[in-house]
Structure formats: structure tokens, C-alpha cells
Image: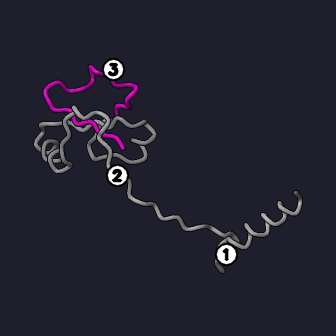
């Protein structure tokens, strides 16, 4: 049993790629393969292109609503987007404009 464990350890070290000159650690290179596109989770929700959304916002016809967390919004968001984290939308509905199209986005 002990011999098998020692042999396994020796073989695992022999199969490792060599460490680079700049790093004391050996890091395997993993190539990610493209995954098939799945159906969107809400297929009945209308979707628009980024260009169409930009045009509607510029024309004053729509408002961008970022439904990610406040932390994600504070880190980076689309210019002019309002922060309405998903869990707050129902409580803050009265703050949303009723005369414009609402374009919600997340990542």
C-alpha cells in the first residue's frame, strides 16, 4: 500500500509541466471551449440590440435600468443608467418613469 502511494506521488510529479523561469509555481494552461448557446431563460421577454437601446435613450424614448447589485453598478455601469437592484424593483416601482420605455439590463 505504501509503495503504491509513493509511486503515485512520483508519477504525479513527473507529469507536471515545468515551472517557468519567472515563477516558482507550475500552472497548467486550460483552454476554454465555446459552449452551445442555450435558450434565454425568459424567451417571451422582448430583447433589443445595444444600438437600438442607445438610439431610444438618446431620443428620450427610453431609460436604462441596471438591475445588478449596487456594488456592481458602482463598479461600472452604462452611461445614464439608473440603479435598481433586482431585489428592490418592486418596492421602488413608483420611482420609475411611466412615460418611457424601460430597458433593463444585467450581466
- Quadrant where the N terminus is found in the figure: bottom right
Residue at 84% in and 64% down = 6
Find numbered disc 2 in the image and state the secondary structure of the residue it sits on. loop
Q: Is residue 70 left or right of residue 39?
A: right
Residue on which disc 3 sits: 90
Residue at 27% in and 36% down = 104
Place of residue 89 in the rendered image (x, y in percent of width and height, measured from the top left):
34, 25
Q: Which residues make up the magenta segment? A: 83-107
Residue at 16% in and 36% down = 62
Point out which mark residue 19 bears.
1
Contact (Cβ within 8 Å) of mark 1 with mark 2: no
Which class describes the residues within 10 Å of circle 1: few (<14), some (14-19), or many (20+)?
Answer: few
Q: Nearer the viewer, residue 59 or 5?
A: 5
Residue on which disc 2 sits: 36
Q: Disc 1 to disc 3, how far (Cα)?
A: 53 Å
Tell me the quarter of the picture where residue 21 sits.
bottom right
Q: Disc 1 to disc 2, how far (Cα)?
A: 34 Å
Residue at 21% in and 31% down = 44
- Quadrant where the C terminus is found in the figure: top left
Place of residue 71 in the rendered image (x, y in percent of width and height, measured from the top left):
46, 40
Nearer the viewer's eye, disc 1 or disc 3?
A: 1
Q: Nearer the viewer, residue 44 or 1?
A: 1
Amino acid at each position: 500500500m505504501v509503495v503504491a502511494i509513493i509511486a503515485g506521488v512520483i508519477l504525479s510529479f513527473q507529469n507536471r509541466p515545468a515551472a517557468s523561469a519567472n515563477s516558482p509555481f507550475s500552472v497548467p494552461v486550460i483552454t476554454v471551449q465555446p459552449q452551445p448557446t442555450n435558450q434565454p431563460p425568459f424567451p417571451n421577454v422582448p430583447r433589443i440590440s445595444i444600438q437600438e437601446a442607445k438610439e431610444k435613450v438618446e431620443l428620450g424614448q427610453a431609460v436604462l435600468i441596471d438591475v445588478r447589485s449596487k456594488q456592481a453598478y458602482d463598479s461600472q455601469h452604462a452611461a445614464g443608467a439608473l440603479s435598481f437592484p433586482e431585489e428592490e424593483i418592486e418596492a421602488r416601482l413608483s420611482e420609475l418613469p411611466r412615460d418611457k420605455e424601460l430597458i433593463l439590463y444585467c450581466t
